[in-house]
Image (cartoon, rainbow, N blue to C red):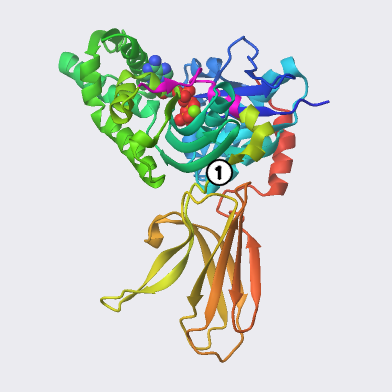
Amino acid sequence: MAVTHIGIDLGTTTSGLAYLRPDGTPDIVPHADGERLTPSVVAFEPQENTTVVGAAARDYGDPARTVRLIKRHLDDPGHLVEIDGRAWTPTELSALILAKLKRDAERTLGPIDECVLTVPANFNELARRATAAAGRLAGFRVRRIVNEPTAAAVYYAHTHDVRGRVMIYDLGGGTLDIAVLEIDGGDLRLLASEGARRLGGSDFDEALLGLMADEYRRQHRTDLFENERQRQQALQTGEDLKKTLSRLPNAANLIGDEQLGLSRIEISRDVFEQAMSRLFTRTHMLVEQALDSASLRPDQIDHVCLVGGGTRMPRIRAMLRDLFGREPLACDNVDECVALGAALFSQKAARVREVCNQGYGTLALLEEADTGRVRYANSIVIPKNTPIPCEYSQTYVTSEDNERALEVAVTQGEDEDPRYVDIVGKIRLELPPGRPAGCEVTVTYGYDADQRIQASVTDHLSGRREEVQVEYVGAGVLSDEQIRRRAVEFRSMKIK
Ligand SMILES: Nc1ncnc2c1ncn2[C@@H]1O[C@H](COP(=O)(O)OP(=O)(O)OP(=O)(O)O)[C@@H](O)[C@H]1O
Ligand SMILES: [Mg+2]
């Protein structure tokens, strides 16, 4: 029988797979070479059909054939990576990482069929679907997509006897995710969740690379890197320096290479923290925003729980200590708790009440009260952070005489400006002829626990109604049929 209750944290920089032991405790499944976590890096060997995933890919040494940080592009199916004339989508590249995790774990556990996958709380509909598609391509039946901070909270609640309000602060390689929850033993209720993209460890690495490049130029009057290989090498050195500075007040290393000229760089924690102040400030602002969304003050939070490799930075801990007036707790294992929580979630889903991670609305003509000017605006139907499952309605009026059809756009995003929201679905409702403008129509959205949106529009006068299950139909999104066909192809691929 296939193993059930598998949870996977598909991270920007590292991924992990956990399972539930027969006694109900979650554990990470170490992979083939004994490591517990797998770098989320894919490299393509020149031999056809052979890919390398994990530590070997990270150290592959040929940046033109290596793909990193692909998770950052899961909301952009048009971001194609071309290797040997084949264009790989972010979904397929993520599927290679998931397939590697699956195959490695199957050596220990036997056949695996289904899994729960995690995503950053602020992933949009497109990125969530791309993640689920990646799971299916890799050969999984994807039971649920769950938010990373929710998974971490499930683990935290499982391992500690918690009652009260908890903030999960997850600073990973790619994103910062914050969730505020009410935990009562094994029951979890999300109060708010906020996230920021491009605010993770790799953004600190990029910023540090800039600092190193300036210092190198000052010493050598030349650039620290002339090609991608040298740039990657310098980035790695920077990441090592960053990690050392989490332990020690000073760090030193050699930068450059024999060809460019070697140089010793020494950096203090103070200088590092000053140079990163913009990033630290953004992380602080997001905490304030999460508190604001939950309508809570810092003193109303009972526990602050740290998740993600980036929370090893002392500045982050100090910021949270200053704000909350007490030491934040590190989740027992900041690198593994999302995967462990995802495995637990697959069993405890019913005890978790989540919120909508984005606002959903529709495009409507809005008359400005003071100027009488009419403009298109995004009118919110389900506000962000509404507890789910939920159903909300808004009533609008038709804008033209003899309007024969209504096009309702389902939007995702909180902005009032239509340019800054995504259209994730459309409903068309035919209307009877010969009616004046101003006829009432009601738009209803339902959001279920599986994060699916059901949308309907009803015309009051005629009682006509149309309903759709919102399916993201953006360019580059794989259809069910395409996924099935590609999954077969994936099965025969060599992944080392
Ligand atoms: N000691 C440390 N000091 C500072 N940063 C660290 C330390 N250890 C790890 N990191 C950073 O943490 C990041 C990786 O964290 P983690 O594994 O939680 O991210 P991820 O899950 O892959 O990413 P995400 O959750 O954003 O998708 C890397 O950027 C790494 O440099
Ligand atoms: Mg993570």
Q: Secondary structure at mark 1?
A: loop
Q: Is 211 displayed left or right of 12 in the figure?
A: left
Q: Is residue 330 inside the magenta stretch? A: yes
Q: Is 477 displayed left or right of 318 in the figure?
A: right
Q: Nearer the viewer, residue 119 or 190?
A: 190
Q: Amino acid at mark 1?
A: Glu
Q: Residue 20 sits in which quadrant? A: top right
Using a 10 Å C-alpha cutoff, classify the residue at mark 1 as few (fewer than 14 neighbours), some (14 to 19) or many (20 or more): many
| Bounds of the magenta segment | 327-341
Q: Which quarter of the rendering shows the N terminus?
A: top right
Q: Residue 18 sits in which quadrant? A: top right
Report which residue position mark 1 lands on. 354
Q: Which quarter of the rendering shows the C terminus?
A: top right
Residue drawn 74% across the image and 26% down it = 112
Q: Using the image, determine if residue 242 lies above or below residue 375.
A: above
Residue drawn 46% across the image and 37% down it = 179
Please state the horizontal and vertical placement of residue 213, each as a whole percent of the image.
Answer: 24, 21
Q: Is residue 305 inside the magenta stretch? A: no
Q: Using the image, determine if residue 213 lies above or below residue 253.
A: below
Q: Is 211 displayed left or right of 6 in the figure?
A: left
Is residue 126 shown to the viewer in this render? yes
Please state the horizontal and vertical placement of residue 94, each as a whole percent of the image.
Answer: 58, 32
Please give the count of numbered marks on the rendered protein. Answer: 1
Residue drawn 60% across the image and 51% down it = 389
Is residue 223 shown to the viewer in this render? no
Does the numbered disc 1 mark a residue whose Cβ is under 8 Å from ligand 2? Answer: no
